[in-house]
Image (spheres, helix red, strand yellow):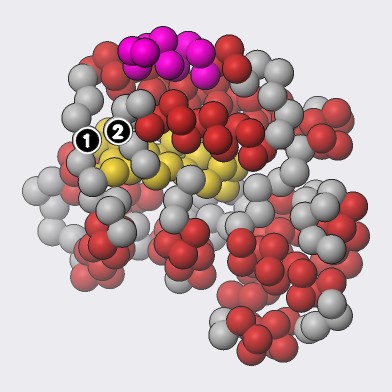
Amino acid sequence: MNRLQSALDFIESISNEVDVDAMLDRLRRVVGQFGFDSFLLTGVPDPGRRIDGYIMLSGWNESWLERYVSQDYVQIDPIARRLQSATDPFTWSDAIQGRELAPNARRVMEEAADIGMCDGLCVPLYDLDGRRSVLSLASQSIDLSPADKGVLHLVAMYAQNRIHDMVGSNAGRRAVRPALSPRERECLQWTAAGKPSWEIAAILCLSQSTTDGYIASATRKLGAANRTQAVAEGIRRGIIH
């Protein structure tokens, strides 16, 4: 099956999708046709804001996702910085080519490369309200034609639109299981067990501020007003028990 046909099949297959995990699997399969084994579909936070709560679909290595979020790498990631002004798809290598990276920015890129995320393609997206999102794709190396980039742009737009439809309608809110990260679920599970933040932090070997960040992110994703409501909603949706 050629890449364009895979993309068209993906677009057709998600038209009535209501499950986040199924969306994740479908997106993983289609970007795999282009040589990518890692991806993240996320909103682009304004400078100074954490990425928690903006992530829509994560096909990243779970350990890397947890590290990226807990260390707040979005503040120093040179690719994230480029996204603040980018309008067209760009490769990671093009974004940093000829630039002298600060040591902390270089560290982010090196740590990503250590787990096989050596280069990637970012597809900037915008919704009707002007909010920015991105489909960031990564692999050991990439080999894409201009036509491939155009097809991936199409895939990204349809994936973003479908996710927005899923969480934006009342039916979607009932049917969709929010894509909480493993750490968000873990922190919420310990919250459900009656543990305060300081104790959860000790159990999971995290700082209290990082723990609070995970709980706050889970609370936002679940549409809850506070952590008590988040626990109740998490139990109701089968995310925690």
Secondary structure type for disc 1: loop
Numbered badge on residue 207: none
230 left or right of 63 in image? right
Q: Which of the 4 quarters of the picture holds residue 184?
A: bottom right
Position of residue 194 relative to residue 39, above or below, is below
Cβ atoms under marks 2 and 1 closer than 8 Å: yes
1 lies above or below 161: above
Label 2 packing within 10 angstroms: few (<14), some (14-19), many (20+): some
Q: Which labelled disc corresponds to residue 35?
A: 2
Can residue 104 be seen here? The reply is: yes
Query: Quarter of the image containing the C terminus?
Result: bottom right
Q: Earlier in the sequence, mark 2 or mark 1?
A: 2
Dominant SS type (magenta)? helix
Left or right: residue 176 versus residue 207 is right
**Residue at 61% over, 66% down:** 183
Callout 2, which amino acid?
Gly
- In the image, 122 versus 36, the foreground residue is 36
- The reply, left or right, for residue 14 in relation to residue 40 is right
Q: Identify the image quadrant of residue 189.
A: bottom right
Q: Position of residue 92 (x, y in %)?
A: 25, 43
Q: What's the residue at 67%, 30% (across, down)?
A: 164
| Residue 161 percent coordinates (x, y) | 61, 24
Indicate which disc residue 142 carries. 1
Segment colored magenta: 1-10
Amino acid at pointer 1:
Ile
* Residue 72 seen: no
Q: Is residue 138 above or below residue 109?
A: above
User: Residue 187, image x and y in percent?
Assistant: 70, 71
Of 142 and 162, the residue lying toward us: 142
Query: Badge 1: how crowded within 10 Å, few (<14), some, or many (20+)?
Result: some
| Quadrant of the image containing the N terminus | top left
Residue at the left extreme? 98
